[in-house]
Image (tube, rainbow, N blue to C red):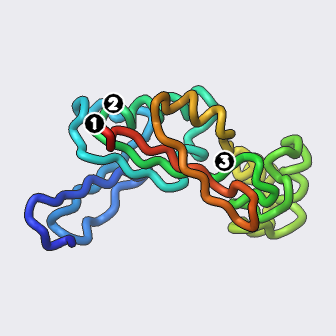
């Protein structure tokens, strides 16, 4: 597929990476501000488990608006806030604990992808590093999009918002 004519990829991460092929352009950037790109510049915007890391609900809505603005189509996936196991910390209901409890847990245990932390500020940053969204919030952020639900053992595990494919 990478060898097909006319297919190019633009990657945006917090830090620019070395392209793996001449068909890739890599930029450092922030998904909340894609002002370097014009409206509908991309055939498709693809984001897998990013929107929960951009900040608070307003920041998440800002990212959603930018994705819809720069893409003719979009495919945005994110974990479900109400799935019982928080996917970053791999701890039951971690997303609902008060910040103080999250910080304490991170300072006393290795949780998910995070090693045990000795620094309180580091633990607080980690605890605040993901804000999972609800189905209702996603539907507000991506009006008119189709919602697809991935389930695990009957529980809605993640949501994918897809838009622009009907046009």
The answer for how far apart the CA atoms under marks 1 and 3 are is 33 Å
Q: Which of 71 and 90 is in front in this view?
A: 71
Q: Where is residue 28 drawn, in percent x and y? A: 35, 49
Q: Which of marks 3 and 2 is nearer the N terminus?
A: 2
Q: Mark 3 points at which residue?
A: 130
Task: List the single residue furthest toward the left.
Answer: 5
Q: Which residue is drawn at 75% across and 49% down?
A: 127
Q: Where is residue 122 drawn, in percent x and y? A: 73, 52
Task: List the single residue furthest toward the front.
Answer: 166
Q: Where is residue 154 drawn, in percent x and y? A: 75, 62
Q: Mark 1 points at which residue?
A: 167
Q: Say what secondary structure mark 2 lies in.
A: helix
Mark toward the viewer: 3 or 2: 2
Q: Residues within 10 Å of mark 1 (few under 14, many from 20)?
A: few
Q: Which residue is drawn at 30% across and 47% down?
A: 44
The answer for how far apart the CA atoms under marks 1 and 2 are is 15 Å
Q: Tag on residue 13?
A: none
Q: Residue at x 30, y 35 (%)?
A: 70
Q: Residue at x 12, y 69 (%)?
A: 4
Q: Which of marks 1 and 3 is nearer the N terminus?
A: 3
Q: Mark 2 points at which residue?
A: 69
């Amino acid at each position: 597929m990478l060898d097909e004519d006319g297919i190019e990829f633009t990657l945006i991460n917090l830090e620019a990476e070395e392209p793996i092929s001449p068909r890739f352009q890599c930029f450092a950037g922030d998904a909340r501000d894609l002002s370097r790109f014009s409206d509908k510049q991309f055939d498709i915007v693809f984001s897998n488990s990013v929107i929960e890391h951009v900040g608070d609900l307003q920041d998440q809505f800002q990212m959603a608006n930018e994705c819809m603005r720069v893409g003719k189509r979009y495919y945005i996936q994110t974990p479900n806030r109400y799935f019982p196991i928080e996917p970053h910390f791999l701890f039951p209901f971690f997303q609902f604990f008060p910040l103080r409890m999250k910080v304490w847990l991170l300072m006393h245990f290795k949780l998910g992808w995070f090693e045990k932390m000795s620094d309180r500020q580091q633990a607080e940053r980690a605890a605040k590093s993901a804000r999972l969204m609800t189905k209702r919030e996603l539907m507000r952020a991506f009006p008119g999009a189709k919602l697809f639900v991935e389930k695990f053992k009957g529980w809605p595990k993640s949501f994918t918002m897809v838009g622009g494919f009907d046009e």
